[in-house]
Amino acid sequence: MKPADVARLTGRAVVAELGGRPPRFALDGGATVVVKDGAADPGSVRAEAAGLRWLAVPGGPPVPAVYGHDDAVLVTGAVPAGRPTAAAAREFGRRLAVLHAAGADAFGAPPPDGPERAWIGRTGMRNRPHGGPWGDWFAADRVLPYLRTARDRGTLTRDDAAVIEQVCDRIGDLAGPEEPPARLHGDLWSGNVLWSTEGPTGGSAWLIDPAAHGGHRESDLAMLELFGLPHLDTVLAAYDEAAPLADGWPGRVPLHQLFPLLVHTVLFGGGYAGRAVAAARAALAQ
């Protein structure tokens, strides 16, 4: 990426190339930006830009500003690196509750101006509004598409796939109390939470690389647990204090983890297939 391209996308002059991966540039006026190449995933730049703008909720976790983009390149503000602290974790839990409460038009709804054909990691994800209950949408658009792909590739055996299909068949019994659509980050693993020295209250947890859509708030929380997060217990306690979770939510964590585990099964195979089946069995045991 050349400075002239960054200037074209942002409408601001580049005063310095700062290097790094992804590359960083200093703009006239003092902002530092990061340039992300999305050319390998058509549509991913538009989806991510729309997601970041949608997640920029007053009182929610801070997200990088979108300075500009085209079909292949996204330019966002850089997040100054910091360290996770208990205070920042408490603040993150409270702010994540605010973000979720901002809501969405429907389960599966994309952000405004976001495409139906979106991305999670390096695989496709369909965002289309669903008028029914969360469980029906989750089974149809978040579990079964990836289950079929993994089964067809031989990554999941037919017997293993049948266990996950049982979850979909019983989804109405397993989903817990109905809740309105929440505004989700959608790919909230620990690598997409950046601890920073800057934020609305000093040290903060910033959100990057969303796969944003309307969904169930327990899905974001379950993904935080799936891949670990510093001070996770503090985050969850602060969240539950700000926006109490429905009874039995810890027992539904494996159900919500099915989606990211199946995505990883499609992308990486290996042990993720076994983890997906184990999560399905745990969900059925509740």
Image (spheres, rainbow, N blue to C red):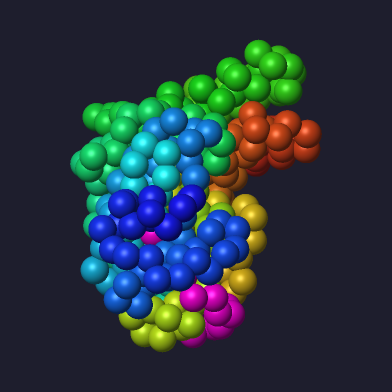
In the picture provided, is 9 more to the left or to the right than 122? left
- Residue 108: say if magenta: no
Q: Would you identify the image quadrant in which residue 133 lies?
A: top left
Q: Nearer the viewer, residue 241 or 114?
A: 114
- Above or below, 105 relative to 166: below
Q: Is 192 located above or below residue 259 in the figure?
A: below
Residue at the image point whose x is 31% and y is 51% from the top: 9
At x 48%, y 82%, the residue is 197
Image point 22% across, 42% down: which residue? Answer: 112
Q: Quadrant of the C terminus?
A: top right
Q: Residue 60, located in which quarter of the rendered image?
A: bottom left
Left or right, residue 218 beside residue 163: left
Residue 69: % across, % down:
34, 47
Q: Which residues are magenta?
A: 76-90
Report the number of discs.
0
Q: Position of residue 221 (x, y in %)?
A: 49, 56
Image location of residue 73, percent across then percent down: 42, 45
